[in-house]
Amino acid sequence: MDSILDKMNKIPLAEWVDDAMSWLTTTFRTSFTFIKDNGKAVMEQTADWLKDVPAIVFIIALVLLAFFITGKKFGLSIFTLLGLLLVYNQGLWPQLMDTFNLVIYASLLSVIIGVPTGILMAKSDTAEKIIKPILDFMQTMPAFVYLIPAVAFFGIGLVPGVFASIIFALPPTVRMTNLGIRQVPKELVEATDSFGSTASQKLFKVELPLAKSTIMAGINQTVMLALSMVVIASMIGADGLGRNVVSALQRSQAGAGFVAGISLVILAIILDRLTQSLNKQKK
Amino acid sequence: MEKIKVENVSKIFGRNIKEASRLVSEQRSKTDILKETGATVGVYDASFTVNEGEIFVIMGLSGSGKSTLVRLLNRLIEPTSGNIYIDGANIATMNKEQLRKVRREKMSMVFQNFGLFPHRTLLQNTEYGLEIRKKDKETRRKKAEQALENAGLLAYKDQYPNQLSGGMQQRVGLARALANDPEILLMDEAFSALDPLIRKEMQDELIELQENVQKTIVFITHDLNEALRIGDRIAIMKDGQIMQIGTGEEILTSPANDYVRNFVEDVDRSKVLTAENIMVRPVTINIDHDGPKVALQRMREEEVSLLLAIDRQRNLKGYVTADDALKAAKEGKANLSEVLQQDINTVTPETLIQDVFNVIYDSPTPVAVVKDKRLLGVIIRGVVIEALAKNEEVE
């Protein structure tokens, strides 16, 4: 016997989404194409520059950066030196640069979009109510699912890879910016207001400086998430270490997979420690 | 001249404001109103004026609405109804721009937990008010340094707030408020977070500051002793309503209702203590063997302008003023008995302080404490008021 549940017609949710997608794709075709072409040109250009820099120069620069940013301690610098030398030795240097490029773009754009969005959320309860579920959606929807619109909008290559990475990596920056500003002690906000500050004076002179370490923690998370998207982004044609991981998987080459994987880990640790000590240093 | 005038100001937090106001006017309690309407009464129908150059203390226990009331004065909290005039201009109806101007130029606030910006040095903190008014760097630095100098903290100007003790931080809080040169200071439990000794010191400094610069000060406190010590007038609040406004003496001697009476009972030592408890060592001169020169010398030593005259048996004979002693010395007299004045009020050691108060109120001289004609001590006006304001020793 049919239960009452079976008597209801299937809601054509998938069809609706498909319709919306194709509407978006056709309506904004020119804008998407514009973003795709220009984005691709710019990003590939920087990737080429990164690859043109002699590896030894890049390694030394990063080691020095690590040395000074961590307050002249040797730990991270030595790790950076040995780690990058290993990647170079394994012949993965160009892939590392591609990955680095992807991560930098995804993180940078996430910060550019995320910090202002977070500020908006902190300032308006309505905005917070609207944006919060969107962020939840972005974070919990499996990453493979939004590869589909990414490809529909931007084809394959670096641009959809960055697009998908941003969707995945953006939420921590937004959330932590919101949190950081809302956590500024009430008395300090009152002090700021009682002196007659304008909204922007309040934001730039008091709220953002006080929220800085929380925001930096969010940015750090964003960088890490962008890095974790590298493998998935490579499935839609973004160059880099992710592609080596995927091809090792397809050919069942444990060794090659490990080497590409460890290279990603090395990059991850360097970026994580660098952004973290940036935060500590500025405190 | 009245500087601040508050007219029927109410603040009700929550949604059901109309219903809540109706219940308040029916004299229902705050808890009842919260239960029935879900609205919280912050301040209800407060009216008072603060005169220029006055220290006006708003006193109440926590939850009485005093902190809300002070925030209504600079509209950190929007009033639900009522008018607040600063120099005749109604704050309640101002637009953002006008309000900002008043906040920048007319009033500064000092906070309970100091409200210092942890990411700014003391100098940068002190500069803040001037900085947002876009004063040039030179001017604001100079003014801020002057304010810190007055607070005795110029040497620390490049330190951060968390490197300082609480008392020092609040001095910076005050310096920051004063650097702006406001006409009105709003002080929200400004000394409550400080330990008792520092608090007393800060109270003294505030009184002194008030005498020197004549700011209009609205001071919030939950401590009646503090209110009595520094307030020219005191408003006592309960459940968002003002119970009584008056001078310390008025509130102590004629409380408006049972609440105020209960409140001041703890502090009212005048009914417990006697003259003996509060008298201090008198500065005396023995007229049997000391002349005018000795008298003048002693006045200089003790920094007083008046000596009580006694004889060998310590019997009170009268008093000598500096003017009279000087005159006697010029005329070459060797004895003071001719210039002695007799119109001195005396009390016995057993006299209650409330009675001493009546005597001392109109007396130009200190009151002598005398037993069987012998001088035991002297009561000065400040001590009486301080005794009334202190209750630690009674408990």
Image (cartoon, coloured by chain):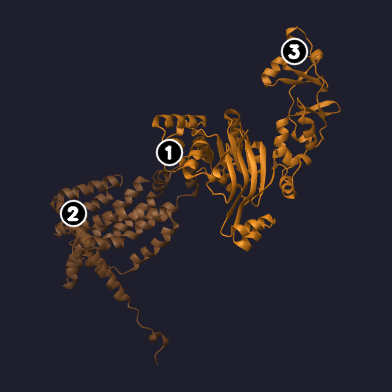
The mark closer to the camera, 3 or 2, is 2
Residue at mark 3 shares a chain with residue at mark 2: no
Tell me the crowding category of disc 2: few under 14, some 14 to 19, or many 20 or more residues within 10 angstroms, Cα based.
Answer: few
Q: Is residue A99 visible?
A: no
- Chain B as rendered: colour: orange
- Chain A as rendered: colour: brown
Work out whether B64 lies above or below B137: below
The mark closer to the camera, 1 or 3, is 1
Amino acid carrying mark 1 in the image: Ile
B333 or A138: nearer the viewer: A138
Residue at mark 1 shares a chain with residue at mark 2: no
The picture places residue A56, in percent across and down from the top left corner, at: 15, 50
Residue marked by disc 2: A42
Residue A262, quarter of picture: bottom left
Circle 1 — which element? helix
Circle 2 — which element? helix
Q: Are marks 1 and 3 in contact (CB under 8 Å)?
A: no
Residue B125 lies left or right of residue A54; in this view the side is right
Q: What is the spatial separation of the Cα atoms under label 1 and label 3, in whole angstroms? A: 62 Å
Q: Residue furthest right?
A: B372
Amino acid carrying mark 3 in the image: Pro
The N terminus of chain B sits in image quarter: top right
Give the chain letter at badge 3.
B
Give the chain letter at badge 1.
B
The picture places residue A99, in percent across and down from the top left corner, at: 20, 59
Q: Are marks 1 and 2 in contact (CB under 8 Å)?
A: no
Residue marked by disc 1: B132
What residue is rendered at 77% in x and 14% in y?
B290
